[in-house]
Image: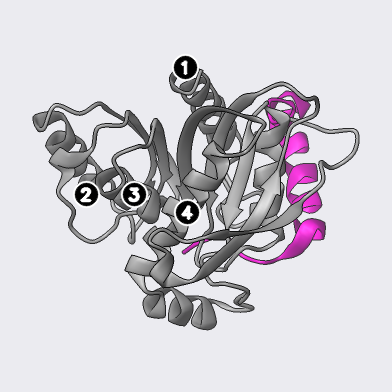
Amino acid sequence: MGVGASGRVGARRVNEVTRARCGAHVLDILPRMSAPLAIQRVDFPALPETFGPASGALVAPPGEERVPAVVLLQEYWGLNEHIQDLARRWAAEGFLVLAPDLYRGVLAEDATKAGELMSQLDRGRALADIAGAVAQLRAHPRCRGKVGVTGYCMGGAYALAAAARLPDLDAVIPFYGIPPQQDWSKITAPVQAHFAEHDGWAKPDAARAIQEAVRAGGGEMELFVYDAQHAFCNDTRPAVYAAEHAATAWQRSVAFFRKHLA
């Protein structure tokens, strides 16, 4: 479950294999930068502020113009290099990005520790950090006004929970994550969900049931299920990474946010 902290060497090896099997065009769909965009560590208040100060990684796209904004939520490993790389990819697509550190400075080095951190995470505080990140982006001088939320694995579950709990979101894109039961009728932001057919944790049938409930409540939810495994978008995990499905999901996600955050 989640995205492993296997480092950029592993990612390069996955990319080499992918190019050999699928052709360079698959990877070229993802944004490529001549130099990495700068990561800025920022502090901001959780909302409500009784949960104390929060922090995260902020990445702005090149230029000075105002742009739409995205809150990016981590997997159960924490705010690691892979999540920061995803933040840079979103920024390269023209979005102002903030990835809140839901573990507040802690990173998991193995799956056992990651599972412990996820199970011990105060859900109310995590949602307060997410709400604070949304407010922080809206107040940023580069933000055009609209803010979307996306996340992977644990972050995908919190993205769906945020859609049900935070009324001021403009669009939400969860990846293979299911939160505890929510009142799905409260979702007003458009949702585009991405799940894997062969996932024993974030099961596609559960995602289909959520889609039915959202639509029954008058909400809008697209659902894409891929012939892949959990974490298929993680280019640092050769065992589960599915390059073509990841590229398709990325294209759909970028188009969805560009449509709803414009």
- Alpha carbon distance from label 4 to label 1: 24 Å
| Residue carrying label 1 | 259
Query: Dot 4: within a 10 Å radius of its alpha carbon, few (fewer than 14), some, or many (20 or more) residues?
Result: many
Q: Main secondary structure of the magenta part?
A: helix
The residue closer to the viewer here, 242 or 72, is 72
Given contact means CB atoms under 8 Å apart, are the residues at marks 4 and 1 in contact? no
Tell me how far mark 3 sits from mark 4, CA to CA.
Answer: 12 Å
Residue 73 sits above or below residue 257 on the image: below
Residue indicated by mark 3: 162
Mark nearer the N terminus (4 vs 1): 4
Callout 2–callout 1 Cβ contact below 8 Å: no
Kindly indicate whether the residue at mark 4 contacts the one at mark 3 (C-beta within 8 angstroms).
Answer: no
Magenta segment boundaries in residue numbering: 1-30
* Residue located 18% across and 40% down the image: 186
Earlier in the chain: of badge 1 and badge 3, it is: 3
Mark 3 vs mark 2: give the one in front: 3
Horizontal and vertical percent for residue 214? 17, 35
Report the disc number at residue 206: 2
Check residue 132 in the rendering and tell me which mark sits there, or answer none.
4
| Distance Cα–Cα, label 2 vs label 1 | 27 Å
Label 3 sits on what residue type? Ala
Q: Which residue shows up at 41% across the image and 75% down it? A: 121
Mark 2 is on which residue type?
Ala
Residue 203 location (% of width, % of height): 28, 52
